[in-house]
Image (cartoon, helix red, strand yellow):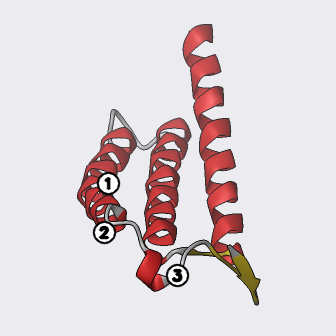
Amino acid sequence: MRKENWKIIIFEEDEKPPWADVVLQIVEILGPIIGVIFLYFITLEDLTPINAIFGLAALALGFAAYLIATIIRNGQINLIYLFIIVIFMVFAVVVLYIMKSLIQIT
């Protein structure tokens, strides 16, 4: 592992694990499923702010999963991508925690 400008090289191209391309293909298959989940929660009953935020959390988790798969496939971490992943994951976890609290209250 070595550092370059805004990147951390995990492995070189010739050291790429054989499962890296499979991971990206699985995430590409799961992308539409996450999109369906997003649309389901948006149109669950009405377009309420809670449904919209919950759908956005599902979309954020899907995008973070795609970025993680891209990192594994390319063998390098762009630090800007890592920052975006952390923001998406924190947003999704906070929203899901708030939703869990709201469901327990009602």
Residue behind mark 1:
35
Image check: 7 left or right of 42? right
Say what amino acid the circle numbered 3 marks: Glu
Q: Distance between the residues labelled 3 and 1?
A: 33 Å
Between circles 3 and 1, the one closer to the viewer is 3
> Does 94 appear above or below 78?
above
Kind of residue sitting beneath label 1: Gly
Task: Read off the residue under disc 2.
Answer: 21
- Give the residue type at disc 2: Asp
Query: Residue 3, percent across and down?
Result: 75, 81
Q: In this view, does 46 lie above or below 101?
A: below
Q: Which of marks 2 and 3 is nearer the N terminus?
A: 3
**In contact (CB < 8 Å): disc 2 and disc 3:** no
Residue 47, compared with residue 71, is above or below; it is above
Residue located at (55% from left, 45% from top)? 53
Q: Are marks 1 and 2 in contact (CB under 8 Å)?
A: no
Going 32% across and 43% down the picture, which residue do you hit?
Answer: 37
Q: Which of 99 and 32 is in front in this view?
A: 32
Q: In this view, does 55 lie to the left or right of 79?
A: left
Mark pair 1, 2: CA separation: 22 Å
State which mark lies toward you, 1 or 2.
2
Q: How crowded is mark 3: few (under 14 residues within 10 Å), some or many (20 or more)?
A: few
Q: Name the residue under label 3.
A: 12
Q: What element carries label 3?
A: loop
